[in-house]
C-alpha cells in the first residue's frame, strides 16, 4: 500500500519555519482542495493523481519518494 507522508512534511515545514502550517494554508498555496489534502493525510491508501503529487512536491520542494512510501501489508 502507498502511504503518504503529508502530515510529516507539514510538521517538518512548521518546525523549520517555527510556525503553524495548516492544511488550509497548503490548500491555498497549491490549489488542491482541502478535502483532498485531508484524505491524503488521513486515509491510508488514498488514491490521487500525479497532478496532486506534482503540486505537493513543488510546495514542499521535495521528490515523490519524500512524499510517499510503500508499506508491505503482508500476505495474511
Image: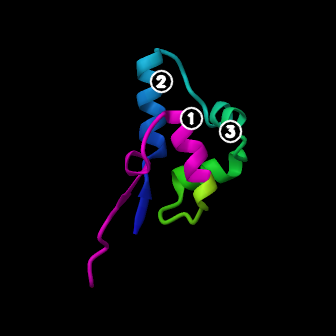
Crowding at label 1, few (<14), some or many (≥20) Cα neighbours within 10 Å?
A: few
Crowding at label 3, few (<14), some or many (≥20) Cα neighbours within 10 Å?
A: some
Which is nearer the N-term, disc 2 or disc 3? 2
Residues at discs 1 and 2 in contact (Cβ within 8 Å): no
Counting from the top left corner in percent of width and height, residue 29 is at 68, 32
Crowding at label 2, few (<14), some or many (≥20) Cα neighbours within 10 Å?
A: some
Give the alpha-carbon distance from disc 3 to disc 1, as whole Å: 10 Å
Q: Does 14 appear above or below 10?
A: above
Residue 48 left/right relative to 67: right
The residue that mark 2 highlights is: 14
Residue 47: quadrant of the picture? bottom right
Frontmost residue, 58 versus 74: 58
Frontmost residue, 70 versus 22: 70
Disc number for residue 59: 1
> Bounds of the magenta span?
52-75
Which is nearer the N-term, disc 3 or disc 1? 3
Frontmost residue, 58 versus 27: 58
Give the alpha-carbon distance from disc 1 to disc 2, as whole Å: 13 Å
Counting from the top left corner in percent of width and height, residue 15 is at 41, 21
Give the alpha-carbon distance from disc 2 to disc 3, as whole Å: 15 Å
Residues at discs 3 and 1 in contact (Cβ within 8 Å): no
**Residue sitting at x 54%, y 22%:** 20
Q: Does 67 appear above or below 11?
A: below
Counting from the top left corner in percent of width and height, residue 62 is at 44, 39
Disc number for residue 27: 3
Q: How is the image coloured?
A: rainbow
Which is nearer the N-term, disc 1 or disc 2? 2
Query: In front of the other: label 3 or label 1?
Result: 1
**Residue sitting at x 51%, y 42%:** 57
Amino acid at each position: 500500500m502507498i502511504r503518504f507522508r503529508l502530515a510529516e512534511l507539514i510538521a517538518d515545514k512548521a518546525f523549520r519555519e517555527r510556525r503553524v502550517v495548516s492544511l488550509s494554508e497548503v490548500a491555498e498555496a497549491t490549489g488542491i482542495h482541502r478535502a483532498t489534502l485531508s484524505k491524503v493525510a488521513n486515509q491510508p491508501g488514498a488514491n490521487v493523481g500525479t497532478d496532486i503529487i506534482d503540486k505537493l512536491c513543488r510546495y514542499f520542494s521535495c521528490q515523490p519518494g519524500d512524499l510517499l512510501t510503500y508499506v508491505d501489508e503482508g500476505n495474511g
